[in-house]
Amino acid sequence: MLTDGGKYRKITPRECFNVQGYPRDFVLPEQSNTRLYKQGGNSVVVPVIKRIAEQIAKVI
């Protein structure tokens, strides 16, 4: 949760996808916020996976 003027608020679906590594210009599908939150939560953070893969490649 974020604070907005001292009050707590949920992050928006757009903010959720941005935190997950999606670019700001990524077009969200026309779905309910509930479905978008689920989709965002089920995705992986691509920059993190890339860094993990690079470290694994160094070890191998």
Image (tube, helix red, strand yellow):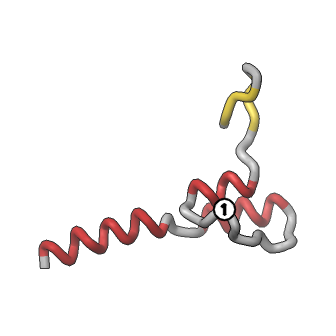
Of helix, strand and loop, which one carries label 1? Answer: loop
Location of residue 4 with respect to 49 vertically, above or below: above
Amino acid type shown at disc 1: Arg
Callout 1: 10 Å neighbours few (<14), some, many (20+)? few
- Quadrant of the drawing holding the N terminus: top right
How many numbered marks, from 0 up? 1
Outermost residue on the top side: it is 6
* Left/right of residue 33 with respect to residue 18 in the rendered view: right
14 relative to 52, above or below: above
Rendering quarter of residue 23: bottom right
Residue 26, given in percent of the width and then of the height, sits at 69, 70
Give the percent coordinates (x, y) of residue 57.
20, 77
Tell me the residue that label 1 is attached to: 24
Query: Within the image, what quadrant is residue 28 found in?
Result: bottom right
Residue at image point 37% right, 71% down:
50
Q: Of all residues shown, which one is farthest toward the front?
A: 25
Q: Residue at x 75, y 50 (%)?
A: 12
In depth, the one of 58 and 40 nearer the eye is: 58
Drawn side of residue 11 relative to residue 46, left or right: right
Question: At which x and y percent is residue 49?
Answer: 39, 69
**Up-down relation of residue 38 to residue 56 (above or below):** above
Q: Position of residue 19 (x, y in %)?
A: 58, 54
Res 30 quadrant in image: bottom right
Residue at the location (13% across, 73% down)? 59
The quadrant of the image that shows the C terminus is: bottom left
